[in-house]
Image (cartoon, coloured by chain):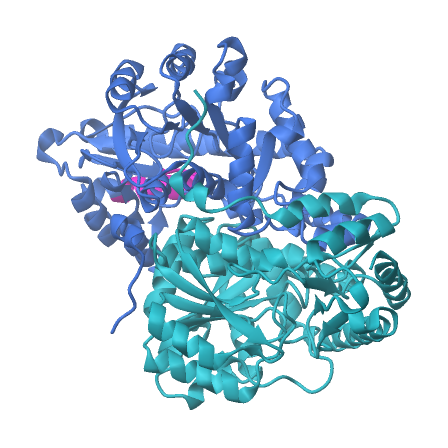
Chain colours: A cyan, B blue
Amino acid sequence: MPLQFADRLNNVETSAIRELFKLLGKPGIISFAGGFPDSAMFDVDGIRAASNAALDQEPGAALQYGATEGYQPLREQISAFMTSKGAAALAPENLIVTTGSQQALDLLGKTLISPGDKVIVEGPTFLATIQCFRLYGAELISAPIDADGVQTDVLEQLIAEHKPKFVYLIPTFGNPSGALLPLDRRKKVLELAVKYNTLVVEDDPYGDLYFGEAPPPSLLALSAQVPGSRDLLAHCGSLSKVLSPGLRVGWLVAPPELLAKATMCKQFSDAATSTFAQATAAQYLKAGRLPGTLTRMRAVYAERAQAMGDALRKDLGQAIAFVQPQGGLFVWARLTGAGGKVADGNAFAKRAIEKGVAFVPGTPFFCAQPDSATLRLSFATADVEKIREGVARLAQAL
Amino acid sequence: MPLQFADRLNNVETSAIRELFKLLGKPGIISFAGGFPDSAMFDVDGIRAASNAALDQEPGAALQYGATEGYQPLREQISAFMTSKGAAALAPENLIVTTGSQQALDLLGKTLISPGDKVIVEGPTFLATIQCFRLYGAELISAPIDADGVQTDVLEQLIAEHKPKFVYLIPTFGNPSGALLPLDRRKKVLELAVKYNTLVVEDDPYGDLYFGEAPPPSLLALSAQVPGSRDLLAHCGSLSKVLSPGLRVGWLVAPPELLAKATMCKQFSDAATSTFAQATAAQYLKAGRLPGTLTRMRAVYAERAQAMGDALRKDLGQAIAFVQPQGGLFVWARLTGAGGKVADGNAFAKRAIEKGVAFVPGTPFFCAQPDSATLRLSFATADVEKIREGVARLAQAL
């Protein structure tokens, strides 16, 4: 008799793009598929210095079990970092450290979702969010986006109709959309939270990676301007895209009662995030190196984004439509079918692999009504020359 | 309107001993309460060298996202370590790295437990296991222990009666019992797994911390002798008690299908365990320092266990009963009430705090039918002198 697994596993399947990723090992492949930062840009010296400082100054604490809420010096550094970005009056006690922001999503699911509960997400949204919430039995509702992110008028209708447990958004340089939600829509989202007494979860791993002007304030920062909204807002942050994903350091800001329940759930999920990684991150932030690292990253990603946009316009022309991203890691594009070219993202992805370039087709990012003409192209890990070569291969595949 | 949390939270409450731990900050308290190793014994130099080697030799990999299954060089080191302890033919692919063994428990719960499923655990067992499984809706059944661990004849009756989803055991120096399951009972457990087609989960964080002779082989190692049992066995291991809890490096060995499902669940729990911590652990194991560290730890904990046992016999005499532990971190004791002394562990814990010594009363470790006369005393973190002073205070409190 085979093992009988939990019913909740019936709600998910292993990600379709994992299969795609197995092909990435092929020699000579240029990859626009990843969702990660460029390893070549990690501040290895800074991280080595930080980790040695942690082991020199606080070896007992850095190697011992830590509080489930997080290592206090890191909570203090994160709270200062968030305050510097406009989140007024954010005390260390208003956040907990999580094992990457993926764990913050998992804790929100565990804490809030009973089987059958509805959750509204953007269509498209982060693939692992869809799977994570479905594992807890959520029924996901797709809120459509346009070039400016989620359409708040449709979002309001969906909230009114479905009375969701919460709304999950990536308002700043979304994954996969790359879209930037403008200030007026941000305010509208917070007003909807209050009007419908609905929790909003803001996932913000990319907000620091802007190329020109800084984006509008996060929902967390803006909540001070919309009375009552702060009590209905959770915010997930992460060092993965700006410092190192390998540290697995993220955080969750939430109203006190929710934060207490999430902490209890975390106690039984992994007891605590690696204190060694947390102490290293705290020393890194304390050393004041992050602003310099961010400046460097922004410049490199801005150059690559521009190169990708230029090459796509030049080589694929009318066959593809996209909005030039103002930050983040991704170009979200749509095949137009112009000139009788291929208009299906999945078919295009297979042809592209044969030509030696990889990307992720758009359909897996939709929890419902997938737009099969879409695709996600990451410009983060290939240099400008590789980006041009990769786009040229895309053009051949098309 | 307050937030409405998931139904699963109704099954648990924040641990009673968390409240106790808040009192530990009182100046001058001698603590026998913790479940952690002594920070003073961490091999800080070895870990610093390992972390620097990781950043020098493989910075990109050590700081990037890693495979959900774990960092391959670490999986190889763990597989070699487990093989050296008798787990024949354990390939790196037979295990995944987890964020501490707490996450292995969480993944087993997420993968296997549907609300209402029955799980058999020892009475008493690890507190966070009880809460972790209850969060997934498990109904826990308590299998009684004696000085030699779980009573396998009663266990068989309970398996036959309840047909549990799985049986969870800590066979080697259990927490809180400190008990060592003898070879014949180990074989019997594996035979029961096969006879009743029941999955057995072996949690083994303490097996390397023996004071005299090495304990009998783990269930995992023994499974080669009981045909069919390996397919019905999961094994949780950890570096937390032997190297550093702050790395949060544990592992799960399980049959292929279960391991694949657990990996999928881990993908949406925290994506991967810190690759920085994993690469550090891999370099540490590769450097061959663990055997020396273990020898040193065994000697120190053996001395402390002896000192605690001697002091308890001398100062508390007939008022307390316990089996001298042969390994691990804990003395599990029972108040006899002899001479009219206090016989309730909770009342005794309160009096003890007033006298300046802390321990954990036994009742929270039972999922049912608690024995209120029991208590858990850790000898791991206080030195011999403090242990004698602490036991003297216990005698006053009694």
Residue B252 appears anywhere in the view: no
Q: Residue A264 at what x, y percent from top left?
A: 36, 55
Q: Is residue A59 left or right of residue A332?
A: left
Number of numbered discs on residues: 0
Measured as percent of width and height from the top left, residue A340 is found at 79, 64
Residue A56: image x %, image y %? 65, 58
From this view, report whether residue A132 is shown above or below residue B378: below
Magenta stretch bounds: B378-393
Answer with the quarter of the image where residue A357 lies: bottom right
**Quadrant of the frame with the N terminus of chain B:** bottom left
Residue B389 colored in magenta in the image:
yes
Report the residue at 45% width, 52% height from top.
Answer: A134
A354 or A245: nearer the viewer:
A354
Q: Residue at 87% of width from left, 45% of height from top? A: A27
Vertical comparison of B218 with B287: above or below: above
Residue B374 appears in view: yes
Task: Pinpoint residue A85: horizontal percent, then vertical percent.
Answer: 57, 82
Q: List the single residue furthest toward the front.
A: A340
Quarter of the image with the C terminus of chain B in it:
top left
Left or right position of A75 against A308: left
Predominant secondary structure, magenta span: helix
Question: Is the residue A335 above or below the residue A195 in the image?
Answer: above
Left or right: residue B294 versus residue A232 is right
The residue closer to the viewer here, A341 or B210, is A341
